[in-house]
Image: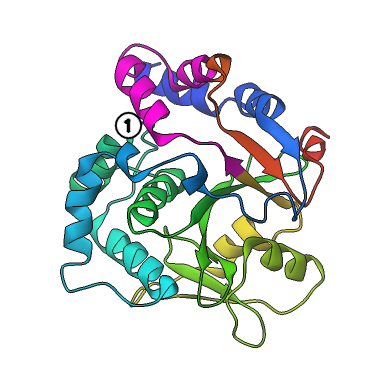
Amino acid sequence: MSLKKIRWTLKRHPFLYLTRFRLLSKNSDAASIATVAYNDWNRKGDIPNFFNDINIEIFKKGKPETALELAKCISLWLCEHTKVGPGLSKPSDKALETMLYGNGGVCSDMAQIFNNFCLINDLQVREWGTTSAPFNRANGGHSFNEVYIKELDKWVLIDPSWGMLFYNENGSPLSVLELYNLSRSGKKINYKSFIPNKVIKHEQVTKNYLNPDITPFLICKYRNKTYDRYLKWARPYLPVFVIHFIVYLSGRSYFYQFPIDNYKRIFS
């Protein structure tokens, strides 16, 4: 077995996956996460300069006036200029560089990059993940974002990997909690990509969002500067899960908040 394959196996091993949730998960509720944002733990100065250079390219024709159009513009540009591929687990500037000029990056890489662009453009943003409860190895989960839209006075789910929004039957864009509550009550949900000619398969949306076994969790206290520093220092020598465990031991790790389901259902 090649070294590359061994690393991939270790990264995806169910024991490591479930151990991460045992260490990092907390039960929560809608009120507790109402104002939680990536911006709470990150400042513009914490973001590598490469993001500011690319931001100039994104908005070289000017910035939209509304928060929703601004967020959509970032997602649209990234989808048109990046190439998906293997998960990266690199410092944020190297991850962005690889996605733009190489071939790599999965939904979690895109969500973290999207966080940084929203931050430097003064948008309140946060990152969500999903998993299955009980754990199902066939579903590796998904990552996406939520942006606070001032003109709507609410959080709105935006999937930057697919350039997609969800809507209720009246055409209003949904937040993450609105989506899952409507889905579980059997209400009609619409979704649409704002990327021209983007085809989204219903099976993929069901797998990542509408399956009743899927539960969302909010990623809290992710400090971009901290993880960039550790990844630059240790990534050539240590597996990613070891680096993350070192950050955990330092007391500066991110954690997961489960506002809908008891996270212990994952281990059922």
x and y, in percent, of residue 151 in the image: 51, 77
Residue nearest the viewer, comparing 69 with 123: 123
Q: Residues within 10 Å of mark 1 (few under 14, many from 20)?
A: many
Q: Residue furthest bottom?
A: 170
Task: Quarter of the image for the C terminus: give it.
Answer: top right
What element does badge 1 sit on? loop
x and y, in percent, of residue 23 in the image: 68, 24
Task: Quarter of the image for the N terminus: give it.
Answer: top left
- Residue 240 shown left or right of residue 101 in the figure: right
Residue nearest the viewer, comparing 197 with 119: 119
- Residue 15 shown left or right of residue 148 in the figure: right
Q: Is residue 230 magenta?
A: yes
* Image quadrant assignment for residue 182: bottom right
Say above or below: 208 vs 250.
below
* Image quadrant assignment for residue 156: bottom right
Residue drawn at (57%, 76%), measured in percent from left and top? 173
Say above or below: 254 vs 147.
above
* Residue on which disc 1 sits: 91
- Residue 26 shown left or right of residue 96 in the figure: right
Residue drawn at (39%, 42%), measured in percent from left and top? 43
- Residue 183 shown left or right of residue 2 in the figure: right
x and y, in percent, of residue 264 in the image: 81, 35
Q: Residue furthest top?
A: 237
What secondary structure is the stretch in magenta mostly built from?
helix
First to last magenta residue range: 219-247
Residue nearest the viewer, comparing 176 with 47: 47
Residue drawn at (63%, 42%), measured in percent from left and top? 138
Residue type, numbered disc 1: Pro
Q: Is residue 103 visible?
A: no
Q: Is residue 267 magenta?
A: no
Q: Is residue 159 visible?
A: yes
